[in-house]
């Protein structure tokens, strides 16, 4: 009986884990961290409104210091997500819970940080820290949105091809192009050479994000290729195949770039924020 | 229709070997087994892997014969169709079979081996955005480093390494802390604005709060509101949060809630520091007697509702050295030593008025300003001078001079009066009725003339003047000093309301008698300083609603925190009072902008 009960318990546990594996970090534990963050924000707003701060609310009143301390602790803890996710070890700390808390508590920092400023904004290290914090949060919001929406289109764009296959296809088309282009004259051959020699990943971050490649040599070759002879027609057909393959790859690049670009702001600005926060705290007490 | 099968191999030296053979059939099989039309000795290839059939429409149907698919143009499929005009590339293991139509109509299948691609994983890395952006780590270090350097390390280092110099508001003297402007949380107030670039003029020590001593190095004349132990005892208890903050702050060396900076918060913008709010005063003064049980101050928290009656300073008895302040609720009887019925002088139909009308310098009944002149600061009045204010009626003319003018008795000192009277006594006497005069140099006015008048007459004159009913006692009270007749000295305080600020300038639309009941005052012993009630006709507390008549008046309108009695002083003539009422709030920002725009 005992074994069966234990087995049932384990089964139930496994089922629970399997279920939870498919719950988004946003909905983790029925939005537990959303509610905690909301409660924290509402408490802070109520305190701000109801506590008489003399001579006016700012970061230097006792309530201001309290908000500042909470905000500072939150920022440090939230930034430790980067450390936590690299530590793959068992324990009671769920990465999903941590991520969920990261998102919701990060959002509550908008309220805590703004109240801590007492709405006093200027050109100084203190406002720099505040603005950096807002930028980090805004990029984080973007990140959550794209993580929720873009992976589906990334998968749709693949059409059952792996990235390696996409590159392989391009190589295959390239080899055929090289053979097919043999009858072409100099000018047209040069166009094909240019198309083939251009790196598939050519184009900067902007090209990836917008999906516009004004320097695309394949497009230029297609534009400059005649269609009189059979050879030319074959090359055009192959160039079109290449362009199509390229556009699939570039579609993947674009979605990937949109998925990843926020991290290139979120992470460096988080570190910059910690630096500005350090300067903020030290300077406030240095010139107390 | 035939297939041209072209195999390209490489010798060990890298030379290319091309072998062509033509297969005249409509279908081909490809696989590892030797019986296939195209034999590929590659373990990755099935024994019979793919079959190619030429279709009626000229296309090639390619089909996997086993479960394993094949690569076509990079994609793994198990069945596909190739148009030989466009061509295609079949991948089987390491072999690549390029299918294309030759010029003679045959379909060429070119087989070549490809080397296993090394670094394919590297190629895949190109899909990541990181391949075209600087690394996050580098950016993090760069940003953080720049911020820490410019906003923390440079100012701290320059603070630590400098040789402290005298304060220089312009910040041009070498030895100033550099790049600390970004630490400022806001502009300094108007009066401190010149210190904007000179943080260390106030923030003297690192991690040390601004000390009172530093403030007082400039504001040396600032008076204490009260002794600090009295202030501490009179303060209402702090809230739990404030108490905790002060406990921590004081343990770290910040001066307590009675320190300068706890009220005078700075960095709130380039504005005039606001006068203290009514609540600031009433926090302590609304029930000060609960905490400072021995205080003589009555509670006050709102001028319109709770403010003690004024206690003007006055001389309570004749000849006192110092004025005293009226006891609460008392009706002071002023002992100035003067007789002066205001009502007689102010009656527009009385004798004084008639007299004034007949005199060229008045020409009309007397007015207050005929005698009372405002001081330049418009706060109080100059002392009334007998010679300017009274003498045109209360004449002290004593006779005619030889030059034809009038001689008069000097006013102000009984000794002067005695001398002047003595001179009258020895002055020219009536010419004898005979008409005879002494001859030559013995005649009147001559060298040897002598006046043999009785000197005692002067003493009688003085005695008469000082005696009740004499000329002096028209205005003065007679007295005796050391057995001699004398007058009571005139005592009037320089300032009646000593602890508040009042300007007549702000009240010039009022009639004097609106506040000072002079027109009905019958005696100089009436203290004509207005009472609380007459002020409250217009002035109510800060929370009162402003109307055409009612002026909401906070404590700071009349009182100053640091200079409870010294706000006004004769030495500091012309100095602005500390307090200036705050400007009326703008109706809306838009209205303010339009107001500025229209000239």
Image (tube, coloured by chain):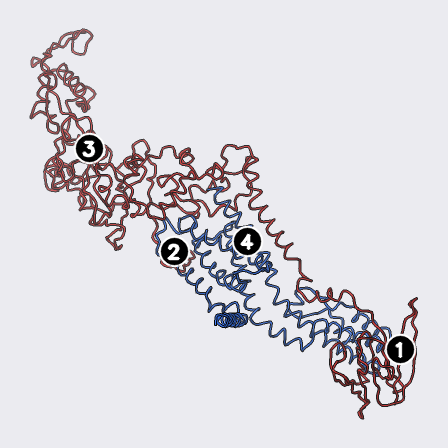
> Which residue corresponds to mark 2?
A48
Looking at the picture, does residue B561 appear above or below residue A155?
above
Which residue is label 1 attached to? B7
Q: Nearer the viewer, mark 3 or mark 1?
A: 1
Closer to us: mark 3 or mark 2? 2
Question: Reading the chain from its start, which is encountered first: label 3 or label 1?
Answer: 1
* Residues at circles 4 and 3 in contact by the CB criterion of under 8 Å: no
On what subunit does the disc labeled 3 rest? Answer: B
Do the residues under discs 3 and 1 have CB atoms within 8 angstroms? no
**Inter-mark Cα distance, 3 to 2:** 64 Å
Q: Secondary structure at mark 4?
A: helix
Image check: B441 left or right of B189? left
Q: Identify whether B96 is placed above or below B579.
A: below
Measured in 3D between alpha carbons, the distance from the residue under mark 1 to the one under mark 4, in whole angstroms, is 63 Å
Report the residue marked by disc 3: B389
Q: State how far apart marks 4 and 3 are (Cα).
A: 77 Å
Chain A hue? blue
| Residue bearing the label numbered 4 | A273
Rendered red, the chain in question is: B
B528 and B259: which is toward the camera: B259
């Amino acid at each position: 009986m005992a074994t069966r009960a234990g087995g049932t318990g384990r089964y139930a546990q496994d089922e629970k884990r399997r279920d939870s594996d498919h719950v988004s970090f946003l909905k983790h534990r029925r939005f537990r961290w959303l509610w905690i963050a909301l409660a924290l924000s509402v408490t802070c707003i109520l305190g701000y409104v109801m506590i008489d701060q003399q001579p006016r609310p700012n970061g230097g009143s006792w309530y201001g210091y309290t908000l500042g301390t909470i905000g500072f602790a939150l920022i440090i803890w939230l930034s430790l997500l980067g450390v936590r996710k690299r530590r793959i070890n068992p324990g009671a700390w769920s990465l999903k819970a941590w991520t969920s808390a990261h998102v919701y508590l990060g959002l509550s920092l908008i309220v805590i940080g703004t109240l801590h400023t007492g709405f006093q904004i200027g050109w100084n290290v203190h406002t720099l820290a505040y603005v950096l914090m807002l930028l980090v949060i805004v990029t984080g919001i973007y990140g959550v949105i794209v993580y929720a929406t873009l992976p589906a289109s990334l998968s749709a764009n693949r059409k059952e091809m792996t990235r390696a296959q996409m590159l392989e296809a391009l190589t295959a088309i390239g080899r055929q192009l090289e053979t097919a282009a043999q009858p072409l004259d100099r000018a047209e051959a040069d166009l094909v050479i240019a198309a083939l020699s251009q790196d598939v990943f050519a184009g900067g971050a902007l090209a990836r994000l917008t999906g516009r490649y004004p320097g695309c040599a394949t497009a230029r070759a297609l534009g400059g290729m005649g269609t009189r002879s059979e050879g030319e027609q074959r090359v055009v057909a192959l160039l079109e195949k290449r362009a199509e393959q390229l556009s699939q790859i570039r579609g993947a690049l674009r979605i990937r770039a949109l998925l990843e670009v926020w991290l290139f702001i979120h992470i460096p600005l988080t570190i910059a924020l910690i630096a500005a926060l350090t300067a903020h705290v030290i300077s406030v007490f240095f010139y107390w | 229709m035939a297939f041209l099968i072209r195999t390209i191999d490489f010798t060990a030296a890298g030379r290319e070997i091309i072998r062509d053979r033509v297969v005249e059939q409509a279908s081909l099989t490809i696989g590892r087994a030797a019986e296939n039309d195209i034999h590929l000795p590659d373990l990755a290839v099935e024994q019979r892997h793919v079959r190619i059939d030429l279709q009626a429409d000229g296309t090639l149907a390619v089909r996997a014969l086993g479960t394993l698919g094949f690569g076509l143009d990079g994609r793994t499929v198990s069945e596909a169709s190739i148009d030989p005009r466009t061509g295609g590339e079949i991948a089987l293991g390491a072999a690549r079979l390029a299918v294309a139509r030759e010029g003679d109509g045959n379909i060429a299948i070119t087989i070549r081996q490809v080397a296993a691609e090394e670094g394919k994983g590297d190629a895949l890395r190109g899909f990541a955005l990181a391949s075209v952006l600087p690394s996050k780590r580098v950016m993090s270090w760069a940003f953080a480093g720049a911020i820490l350097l410019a906003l923390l390390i440079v100012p701290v280092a320059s603070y630590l390494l400098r040789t402290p110099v005298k304060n220089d508001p312009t910040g041009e003297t070498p030895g100033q802390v550099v790049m600390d402007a970004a630490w400022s949380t806001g502009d300094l107030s108007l009066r401190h604005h010149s210190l904007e670039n000179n943080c260390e003029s106030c923030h003297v020590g690192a991690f040390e709060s601004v000390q009172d001593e530093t403030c007082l190095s400039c504001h040396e004349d600032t008076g204490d509101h009260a002794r600090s132990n009295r202030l501490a005892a009179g303060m209402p208890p702090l809230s739990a949060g404030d108490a905790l903050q002060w406990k921590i702050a004081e343990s770290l060396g910040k001066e307590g809630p009675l320190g300068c900076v706890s009220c005078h918060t700075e960095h709130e913008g380039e504005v005039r520091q606001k006068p203290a709010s009514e609540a600031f005063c009433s926090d302590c003064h609304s029930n000060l007697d609960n905490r400072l049980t021995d205080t003589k101050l009555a509670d006050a928290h709102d001028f319109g509702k709770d403010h003690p009656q004024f206690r003007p300073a006055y001389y309570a008895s004749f000849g006192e050295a110092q004025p005293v302040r009226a006891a609460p609720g008392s009706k002071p009887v002023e002992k100035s030593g003067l007789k002066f019925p205001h009502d007689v002088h102010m009656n527009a139909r009385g004798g004084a008025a008639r007299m004034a009308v007949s005199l060229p310098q008045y020409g009309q009944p007397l007015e207050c300003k005929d005698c009372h002149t405002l001081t330049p600061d418009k706060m109080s009045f100059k002392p009334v001078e007998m010679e300017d204010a009274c003498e045109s009626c209360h004449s002290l003319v004593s006779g005619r001079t030889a030059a034809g003018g009038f001689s008069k008795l000097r006013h102000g000192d009984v000794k002067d009066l005695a001398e002047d009277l003595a001179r009258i006594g020895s002055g020219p006497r009536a010419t004898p009725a005979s008409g005879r005069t002494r001859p030559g140099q013995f005649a009147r006015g001559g060298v040897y003339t002598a006046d043999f008048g009785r000197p005692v007459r002067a003493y009688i004159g003085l005695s008469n003047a000082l005696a009740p009913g004499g000329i002096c006692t028209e205005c003065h009270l007679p007295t005796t000093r050391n057995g001699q007749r004398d007058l009571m000295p005139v005592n009037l305080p320089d300032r009646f309301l000593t602890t508040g600020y009042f300007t007549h300038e702000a009240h010039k639309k009022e009639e004097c008698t609106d506040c000072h009941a002079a027109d009905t005052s019958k005696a100089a012993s009436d203290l004509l300083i207005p009472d609380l009630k007459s002020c409250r006709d217009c002035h109510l507390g800060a929370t009162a609603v402003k109307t055409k008549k009612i002026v909401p008046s906070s404590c700071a309108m009349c009182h100053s925190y640091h200079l409870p009695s010294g706000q006004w002083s004769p030495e500091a003539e012309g100095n602005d009072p500390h307090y200036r009422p705050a400007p009326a709030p703008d109706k809306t920002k838009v209205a303010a902008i339009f107001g500025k725009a229209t000239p």
